[in-house]
Image (cartoon, rainbow, N blue to C red):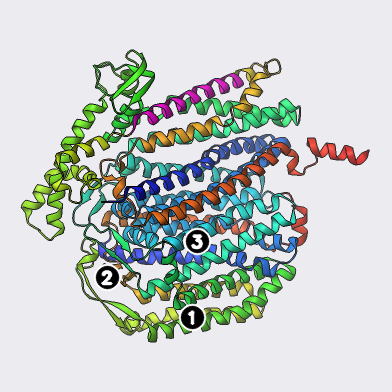
Amino acid sequence: MMDQTFVELSRWQFAITAMYHFLFVPLTLGLTWLLVIMETVYVMTGKEIYRDMTKFWGKLFGINFALGVTTGLTMEFEFGTNWSYYSHYVGDVFGAPLAIEGLMAFFLESTFIGLFFLGWDKLSKRQHLGVTFMTAIGSNLSALWILVANGWMQNPVGSIFSPDTMRMEMQSFAEVLFNPVAQVKFVHTVAAGYVTASMFALGISSWYILKGRDLAFARRSFAVAAGFGLASVLSVIVLGDESGYELGDVQKVKLAAIEAEWETQPAPADFTLIGFPSQETKSTAAAIKIPYLMGLITTRSLDKPVLGLNDLEAQHEQRIRSGQIAYAELQKIRAGDASPETRAAFDAHAKDIGYGLLLKQFVEDPATASEDQIKAAAASTIPTVWPLFWAFRFMVGFGFLMLFIFGAAFYLNAAKKLDRNRWIYRLALLAIPLPWLSSELGWFVAEFGRQPWAIGEVLPTTLATSSLTSGDLIFSIGGFVTLYTGLLIIEMYLMFKFARLGPSSLGTGRYHFEQGAVAHAAE
Amino acid sequence: MFDYEILKFIWWILVGALLIGFAITDGMDMGVGSLLPFVAKTDQERRIAINTVGPHWDGNQVWLITAGGAIFAAWPMVYAAAFSGFYMAMLLVLFALFFRPVGFDYRSKLESPKWRNAWDWGLFVGGAVPALIFGVAFGNLLQGVPFQLDELLRSHYQGSLLFALIPLLNPFALLAGLISLAMLTVHGAIWLQLRASGPVASRAATIAIRLAPAVTVAFALAGVWLWYGFEGYRIVSEPAHNALPNPLAKEVVRASGAWFDIYRTLPIAMIVPALGLAGPLLTALLAMAKRPGLAFVTSALGMTGIIGTAGLSMFPFVMPSSLDPKSSLTIWDASSSHLTLNVMFWAVVIFLPIVLAYTVWCYARMWGRVTAEEIDARSHQAY
């Protein structure tokens, strides 16, 4: 049995380091494409202002990118340092996309990024555009591979547990790669990154316009961001990862928890817009419901039911009992029993071995668990509902707010009505934090909603840790929080400084503060 | 699909190649970082040194990340046992590495000398500390690591918190750490002799000429110490090499001289340590003859010899256990499944040549000495 305080600390550390990392990732994913768009216009038209735009937004990109790399290093090694049993148990499947991410994506992104910043004078126009494009492809491919890895944690396809090696082993690489959960998550995540970058550029450009500075520069940036942002936010919402919730048991639980659906409703199910879910009473107080909507959204049909949490829990209890048998047979195999009968008995219950392992949190030998322990394990398969319920609603709410902002910005720009509607500038500036909030909430829903599993239905989080102590974790969490926060403060300081300075920071002599300086010198 | 046994062996070569690739590329940046406060005094000199690696350090660092990912994919149990067992050392490496991306990108964004000096020390820490710790880790692997596997193959490490760090820093491991730090520093110095200009290049050459022979001496000393001072590990009985991996199925004994078995059974293998001894000496001579291009090659070969010797001497062990020798992890019993090794093998065969090709293109485009005039002219862009 694992020390639960230690498990909690391990989870906190992973959550903190991953969420810090994802403060920087979305901007990288999206801003690279904005840079590609701006630089393409420069190469095609030869207009200097587009080169300046690429360079300036590239400067802000660099400030953000540095911390993305810094916090990303931790992620590559943290599975081994803090989730060592996880690493052993699923490394055969999970390690492959991570290694391919390095080979195929990180190399591409990181090798060319240096030339993006420092190669302006050493490359031809087209070569430099090629470099920018490679960086964008590389960063987006890295998102693909990490989401293939993460999608497998949510819906572990293409693999099977081997009692001989005591781990999950890959059966089909193609199934792991084309895991539908991974594919929808990839689209959802990169599009969210594009939204982040667009809101960032839209908001900062708006500020220049409100200040009346560098108008030609700011208006062009605003237009690019509005167009790209509108397309992206539509992708996030329309292609969102809703379809992923049909697949795999973990996703079903997550869906039911997000919707606070305790009892299975007759199809098509109502959608609970707002309410106060309670884990104790297994009900949602003051619920405001929209008839039929959830059934339509999640099953795209009028006749398929959406399973409720209580039914799911009852199913899990049965699988835990089956998992007990699997565990008992596994013990015999590990002890050297090579008889075909034992193997057949194990195989009959092999798909539930993960459920058997859930009991490890409550009893040393799952085969001997009491009725109460089985009930407790079944209850543990349902994550705490209210944080998921609310996090999801805020994420979606922010998404629609951003849809409105981008829609308005795009329309007003296209209709040339921006001058009479300066409220859009103020709104865009205030909205800069929204995509970050949505992304963090989205990851919270995806990962907290996966609990109690590290790998859905395969490996419980409590077993996945390393054999460290709470003291080790307190030390390392302290180190990460101190260093990350210190670096984040420095990053924000630079970001604000250069965003305020605007294109004048390029030293071309063509922009606001430089002309001021020239004027001063002339006086 | 290749035979399982052959794939297991190929992956030992590939992980070794990634680690050597890391030393040659990112080791160079770490060497430059370690040298930064000493070879470059003024801000302009420091910018010259930094900008010789400025466009490339990030791509180079991916060798480390990919090596980590490859160990995860090919030897999950090694990734699990080593990274959690060396917890405090890994944290130290990570915390030090944090200062590199921000050091490179933020340093020259503000004019303040205090700001710039602080990041220069950050780059120093980010170069020197990992270089030292990686050597310390190899020094400990050669002595065996105090971990064991339970019946569910969970690894348990003896000792925890900072107390686990102190035994890691034993004299032999520190010697290994110094060899690692010194060889990467020499490598960085040769790079500066090749690509920097003015006093930075000449100071770097002087350091390379003085430090490189010390690498050879320390490497030889470590070999003698290993022979007389430490027992190696030897497999007494084991399942077939292409069997399903199960570390607990073998018998292992500790025996003095076991780490030299390979050179007795396969004398040609002695080429590898010979390369480790000769490489640094040739590097010093070529640096003296003002041939930094060739010196860079011999330095790379020397590091290949030194890293290769550590790996080869332990073959087929990757992570011997001092606590419970049969828990030791070898390339035969800590590998991934046949399918995963095969998929990953083809991923490497396809992508590594592409990576090498565009890496060469990038270096070629940015080639040329970094000069003071260039830094002044591109003050707003350069690192």
Task: Quickly name the residue at label 1.
Answer: B219
Residue occupied by mark 3 = B93
Q: Identify the mark at residue B324; answer none if there is no mark.
A: 2
- First of labels 2, 3 by sequence position: 3
Q: Are marks 2 and 3 on the same chain?
A: yes
Which chain is indicated by disc 1?
Answer: B
Q: Nearer the viewer, mark 1 or mark 3?
A: 3
Marks 1 and 2, the one that precedes in the sequence = 1
Q: Which residues are magenta?
A: A384-410
Q: Point out the tag, 1 or 3, that comes first from the N-terminus.
A: 3
Q: Which residue: 43% across, 59% down?
A: B67
A82 displayed left or right of A139: left
Question: Image quadrant for the C terminus of chain A?
Answer: top right
Q: Give the class, few, some or many, for how many residues have Cα within 10 Å of label 2's Cα (few <14, many ≥20).
A: some
Frontmost residue, A244 versus A449: A449
Residues indicated by labels 1 and 3 sit on the same polypeptide chain: yes
Residue sticking out furthest to the right: A523
Disc 2 to disc 3, C-alpha distance: 27 Å
Is residue B215 rendered to the left or right of residue A416?
A: left
Asked whether disc 1 touches disc 3, contact meaning CB atoms under 8 Å apart, the reply is no
